[in-house]
Image (cartoon, helix red, strand yellow):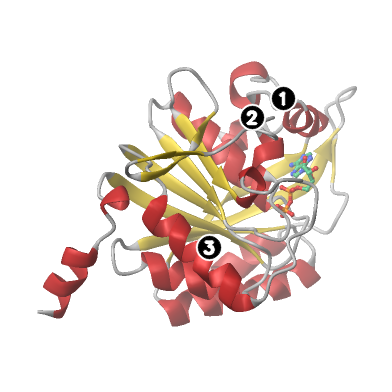
Amino acid sequence: AAAAGERSQRPRNLASVQHIILVLSGKGGVGKSTISTELALALRHEGKKVGILDVDLCGPSIPRMFRAQGKAVHQCDRGWVPVFVDQEQSISLMSVGFLLEKPDEAVVWRGPKKNALIKQFVSDVAWGELDFLVVDTPPGTSDEHMAIVEALRPYRPLGALVVTTPQAVSVGDVRRELTFCRKTGLQVMGVVENMSGFACPHCAECTNVFSTGGGEELARLAGVPFLGSVPLDPDLTRSLEEGRDFIQEFPKSPAFPALT
Ligand code: ADP
């Protein structure tokens, strides 16, 4: 009866969303939004339709990564129409960045207001048919994480992709993320190590700028899959700054194999 009750309350805007993946990281700046963005682009290249829900309310970076700052979210009879990044409408975005009058102004909200917006994101965005909904979360495990997991969990099993850099300190933070996943019933799809090594564009020699292997070791200890290492790649930085499609335009770049 409880399950039937939950089903009847299912927001109809999520009814045609097949899979939901939360992208998590222990702290900021490790490349969580980058991985969310490139994951969406890689899935589009596989012919999938993808939505990105940016619940990093205090530091939304998804609009910038798709060069969609300043675009507006419209209302339709089913709620908010997300921002489409291409004519084929294969990637759609929703972020608080599209709702602010001054997008660069920081959101200074108390927890209840943040929770209310996250609930609204879950119920009111008219995604249409999606193969994947990628949720870019804030760093750490905050109120926003609890709110999004509680709002989504009744409707779909939720996968979690955990992003870390190779240093031990970042790895320690990730251990907390994995505990959060276990406690909240998220299914950990695996750990991605980002910024692991720098492949010199001149001599192709790889320098391990930070220590190496932290993500892999962590995944092994936690008994979750290790999905791979993404090197530091100036082409990737540039393509994100310019809102370009890295997967399409930089097939020879060092980060390409890992990201595809
Ligand atoms: P987070 O979402 O974890 O705060 P971001 O995805 O915003 O981190 O990444 C921080 C910065 O690092 C961005 O400017 C991004 O372009 C850059 N960056 C992330 N990963 C890489 C990489 N593998 N190679 C080069 N630059 C990267």
Could you tell me which secondary element the residue under label 3 belongs to? helix
Q: Is residue 24 above or below residue 14?
A: below
Q: Is residue 131 above or below residue 140?
A: above
Q: Residue 137 — which label?
A: none
Which of the two discs, 3 and 2, sits closer to the camera?
A: 3
Marks 2/1: CA–CA distance: 6 Å
Q: In this view, does 206 lie to the left or right of 62?
A: right
The amino acid beneath tag 3 is: Leu
Q: Which mark is residue 117?
A: 3
Ligand 1 - quadrant of the structure image: top right
Q: Where is residue 13 in the image (x, y as percent from the top left)?
A: 31, 49
Name the one closer to the observer, 83 or 205. Answer: 83
Residue 217, image x, y percentages = 64, 66
Residue, disc 1: 253
Estimate how packed mark 1 is, as few (under 14), some (14 to 19) or many (20 or more) residues with alpha carbons within 10 Å: some
**Residue 16 found in image quarter:** top left
Q: Is mark 1 on a helix, strand or loop?
A: loop
Q: Name the residue under label 2.
A: 256
Name the residue at 80% across, 53% down. Answer: 105
Q: What residue type is labelled 1?
A: Ser
Label 3 within 8 A of ligand 1 by Cβ: no
Whether residues under marks 2 and 1 lie with C-beta atoms below 8 angstroms apart, the answer is yes
